Amino acid sequence: MVRKILSRLAQYGFTLLAASFLLFTLTEFSPGTVASKILGPYALENQVALLNAQLGLDEPLLHRYVDWLQTLVGLSPNLLPEAAPGLGLSDPRGDKYFGNFGYSLMMKEPVLDVLADRIGHTAWLSAWALGLTIPISLLLGTLAGMHAGSSVDRVISTVTVTLTSLPEFVVAVGLLLIFVASLGWLPGTSSLQPGDQWSTGAQLVLPVTVLLIASGAYLTRIVRASVAETMQADYVRTARLKGLSPRRVIWAHVLRNAMIAPITVILLQVNWILTGVVVVEAIFAYPGLGSLMLRAALFGDIFTVQALTMLALSVALITQFLGDVAYAILDPRIRVD
Amino acid sequence: MSILQIESLCVAYDGAEVVRGFDLTLKEGESYGLVGESGCGKSTVAFAVEGHLAATGKVTSGSITVNGTALTKIAEPQLRRLRAAHMSMVFQDPVAALNPTMRIGDQLAEAAREPADILPIMDRVRLPDPEALLKRYPHQLSGGQLQRVVIAMALLSRPSLLILDEPTTGLDVTVEAEVVALISEIAAAEDVALLYISHNLGLMARVADRIGIMYAGQLVEEGPVRSVLRSPKHPYTLALLACLPGRKDRAPGTPLPSIPGQVPLIGALPRGCAFAPRCAMSKPGLCDVDPPLRMVQTGTDHFARCRRLEDQPPMSKEQQTPPTRDLRAHDTVLEIDGLRKTFGRRGLFAPPPVVASDDVGFTLPAAQTLALVGESGSGKSTLARMLIGLDVADKGTAMFDGKNIAALPAKDRPDSLIRQIQMVFQNPDGTLNPAHRIGFILARALKRAGQPHGEQDVIRLLDSVRLPATLADRHPADLSGGQRQRVAIARAFAGSPALIVADEPVSALDVSVQAAVIGLLSDMTAAHDTAILLISHDLMLVRHVAQHVVVLYQGRVMEQGPADAVFKAPFHPYTEALLASVHPPDPDHVVSPLDAPDDPGPSPQDGCPFYNRCHRRLPQCSAMPPPKRDAGTGHAILCHRELQDLVPPERT
């Protein structure tokens, strides 16, 4: 078991490395170079060449990648503040530390500082969204799947099918029209500025609700399908014919088996809510990672985009690992002694 | 006292009746066998007794009484108490019947009336090391062990009624024999009433006191097992018995009779006798008119539902002249020598590899049938997979058409070679793409085989497997199991291959259809000059159709030779054990148990792999590989015993 976990972790390390190389290569092809971003569109060619040389950007790709990686893990310093003194870049942590993604060209700040506030906001939003989505979908999905074909099932299925087919922005706009424009109960933006007239809780209600609807409706359907299928299994029939009570049949025989298949979907939702909530954050002007990603990408803030992508990758790998562990806990067939 | 009483039971699915006026009385300690083709309503009766019909199913009239409680009148909680305390059910597939994520012990505990019963009952069903087993999960046990667990579970509630729905289908013959003996022994000791549901007449002959033959939702014949199987009265019973291969009065190779047509669909019953359209005895104006037939007494406690009982011919005893078997020297189509295949990871810490085939060698003459027999795990399927290139051998040769194909994977085989070796699988449902029409499937097979593949060619191919041309427009789901297997055979024969590997081609089919499919396979073989490598666990079937037999145990050939010789003494002890497990549909068949040891440990490294289970073992068997003994005419036995010691004593 320990061997299996270690080898899995080694695999993840390799995946992260390979992905970082791909990411680095891809950003090479993004429009506009670092130098032209710093010097502006009217820079002379020899100015650009000089900056490129100072930053080591005229070296071959692989060489630059290794440089980037060394800076990232804190082996070599970030050369940008020296090369472009006009930008006034400085980093209180020094120029060599682990996780040095460089500077956000958009904010003129170290990328880590830019991320720091945002991560907190995203974590807050995610915690609420996931904390509601997962239990509610498991509950509704199980309820519908247990009574497949009944009126409870039909109501839950119809509602969830309708909700999954609505894009997030439609749901968001609809809720805005009702609760902000008509009723005026809730704020239309959730920028979490200090001194806002709305409390943080009130600002969170709408974004969390949109995420709950978008993610929960889908998850409910997946759980429903899995529970309904498990209800048909021979061993559930065996359990019933033993004379067990319906409650015992569901708890002891159906749930654990029915949860195996939806794990992947649950973790994909976790993944998405943690790092991919671009639309919802943009609509509500929520200062999380998703809206940062959007702005950084539009600005061409290469270093921020790189950092966000690496973060998303790590989250994906961690949820993947949790998924494997959860599978092993739930399903004895894939445990290896 | 009667444990189970069913009176004029009618069950309908969505308003269509599948059980029509079914009566049954089962006394304490009695064993009743319910027989019939699939779709006759046998299982519906069982589920009605358990109060567990599908959502669309409903008992429309009649009554079921278990231990004095009228089942049709009680509410859910009472029904649960009845299930928990008075009846249990054992199903066909023990792997599916147990919860894969729950320990065996927990699953047993749920069913137990007294927790203290668990360990003793595990002993009674002869599960080794019960304490350790309780902590295991189902996937860590073999099929035979799982079925014992299921039986133990069923007995733990100390039921007075045990329903067994095809309890041994899917188990090896040797395991089947043990499991069945075990059930009978325990049932007799505890006075449990048994309701067996099976299509297997041999099994019924062994276990049942009374049997009922069911057709289209009704009993058509019922009586003491001896009376029904010895002097069957209803044409359906006669026909079912006639379909079985391996009857003593029929020489190997003679065509097996089959029952034409199929069980009528729900809601599409003919007038009068439901069996009339398929019955050789039916008489227009008598059998196909209302009113419905009644059960008529035809002997002591023996009833049948037929209008022509007086006109019945006695059970046919015609001795057909056996077809002369063509054993002349033929060209060899396949020559296997020293074939070895192991599975498992290689590496420093890897467990020792599993040997699936070891030093396997035999030759298959053109246009003949060679059967591979052995229990599950004997390496039959691995061998088949190597021949069609799904696996590659580690060592050894398989010469086909002048080429060694043993280590040639399918992707490297030229089309011409792939066309020459085709395969027919056990489960036709899985081999035909459900999204395509039959016509398309066959046209593509013809095209792949480089044959003309127009509409007429497809119709001709369908005709060659005796299917109507109209089926070309249907999808596989619209066909019956037998029809699907015919399509699979047609597909395999599309390019007139030299060799067909048939892996349990009829074991998923009803006996009535089996015979027809086997007959078809033989005819096709003759017409196309194709050799068949038949993989089967059904020894009676093998004896009937194969000219050559190779007996495998744990990947090694234990005995091989012409079928006639292999099925006669001298036997390899393993062959003898396999044959001893076969039970013909004859209630007077004496099972003479072999005095076999059962060492659970691994088979000896250097000695005979069968050592652990051999009833004729000698001390040297565990130390040295057995020598090959020549019994003449290509008949070889791998055993330390002399040939004359391998002849079982005459049964008296």
Image (cartoon, rainbow, N blue to C red):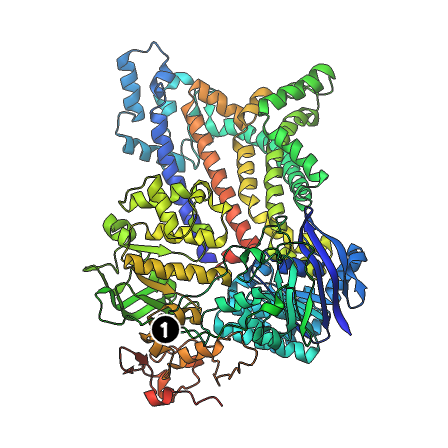
The quarter of the rendered structure image containing the N terminus of chain B is bottom right
> In percent of the image, x 58 and y 31: which residue is there?
A122
* Residue B439 position within the rendered picture, expressed as x and y whole percent measured from the top left: 40, 42
Q: Is residue B279 left or right of residue A138?
A: left
Q: Nearer the viewer, residue B537 or B217?
A: B217
Q: Residues within 10 Å of mark 1 (few under 14, many from 20)?
A: few
Q: Is residue A22 left or right of residue B362?
A: right
Q: How many marks?
A: 1
Residue type, numbered disc 1? Pro
Q: Residue A269 falls in which quadrant of the image?
A: top right
Q: Is residue B404 left or right of residue B193?
A: left
* Residue B634 position within the rendered picture, expressed as x and y whole percent measured from the top left: 27, 77
Q: In the displayed structure, would residue B323 be above or below residue B490?
A: below
Q: Nearer the viewer, residue B127 or B208?
A: B208
Residue A194 visible somewhere in the drawing? yes
Q: Nearer the viewer, residue B249 or B217?
A: B249
* Residue B392 position within the rendered picture, expressed as x and y whole percent measured from the top left: 29, 58
Which residue position holds label 1?
Answer: B322
Instruction: Provide the secondary structure element on which disc 1 rests.
Output: loop
* Residue B87 position within the rendered picture, expressed as x and y whole percent measured from the top left: 71, 66
For this orientation, the residue located farthest to the top is A42
Q: Residue B471 falls in which quadrant of the image?
A: top left
Residue B343 visible somewhere in the drawing? no
